[in-house]
Amino acid sequence: MPFITVLMLEGKSLEQRRRFAEEVTKSAEATLGARPEEVRVRFVDMARGDFARAGRLMCDEVRGL
C-alpha cells in the first residue's frame, strides 16, 4: 500500500489537489501495480517563509527582495 507525501508551497486549490491526487493514484497503479483504493496521498503545505531557494526565502522572492 503506497503512502505518498507531496510537499508544496501553499496556495493550490482543492480542485488542483483533486486532479493531482487522481493522477498520482493512476501512476501508482500503473508503475507499482497498486489498486487505487490502496493508494494514500498526503499533501503538506509549506508557507513561503518556511522554504528557501538559492539562499533566499520564497516570500522574499515574491515581494522582489
Image: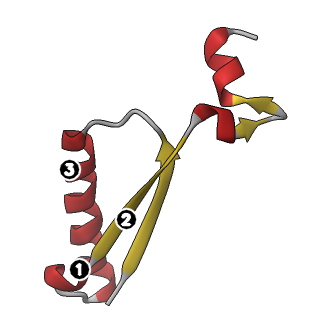
Q: What amino acid does circle 2 point to?
A: Arg
The alpha-carbon separation of the residues under discs 1 and 2 comes to: 17 Å
Residue pointed to by mark 1: 29
Q: What amino acid does circle 1 point to?
A: Glu
- Point out the tag, 1 or 3, that comes first from the N-terminus: 3
Please state, as top left, top right, bottom left or bottom right, where the N terminus lies in the image: bottom left
Residue at point 35%, 37% (across, down): 12
Secondary element at tag 1: helix
Residue at point 60%, 33% (across, down): 48
Q: Nearer the viewer, residue 36 or 26?
A: 36
Residue 27, image x and y in percent? Answer: 28, 70
For residue 41, above or below residue 48: below
Please state, as top left, top right, bottom left or bottom right, where the C terminus lies in the image: top right
Residue 28, picture quadrant: bottom left
Say which mark, if any, is on residue 42.
Answer: 2
Is residue 13 rendered to the left or right of residue 57? left
Secondary element at tag 3: helix
Q: Are marks 1 and 2 in contact (CB under 8 Å)?
A: no
Mark in the foreground, 1 or 2: 2
Residue 51, picture quadrant: top right
Tell me the crowding category of disc 3: few under 14, some 14 to 19, or many 20 or more residues within 10 angstroms, Cα based.
few
- Point out the tag, 1 or 2, that comes first from the N-terminus: 1
Say which mark, if any, is on residue 58.
Answer: none
Residue 30, picture quadrant: bottom left
Secondary element at tag 2: strand
Is residue 50 rendered to the left or right of residue 27? right
Q: Nearer the viewer, residue 26 or 2?
A: 2
Residue 64, image x and y in percent? Answer: 69, 9
Residue pointed to by mark 3: 19
Q: What amino acid does circle 3 point to?
A: Arg
The alpha-carbon separation of the residues under discs 3 and 2 comes to: 13 Å
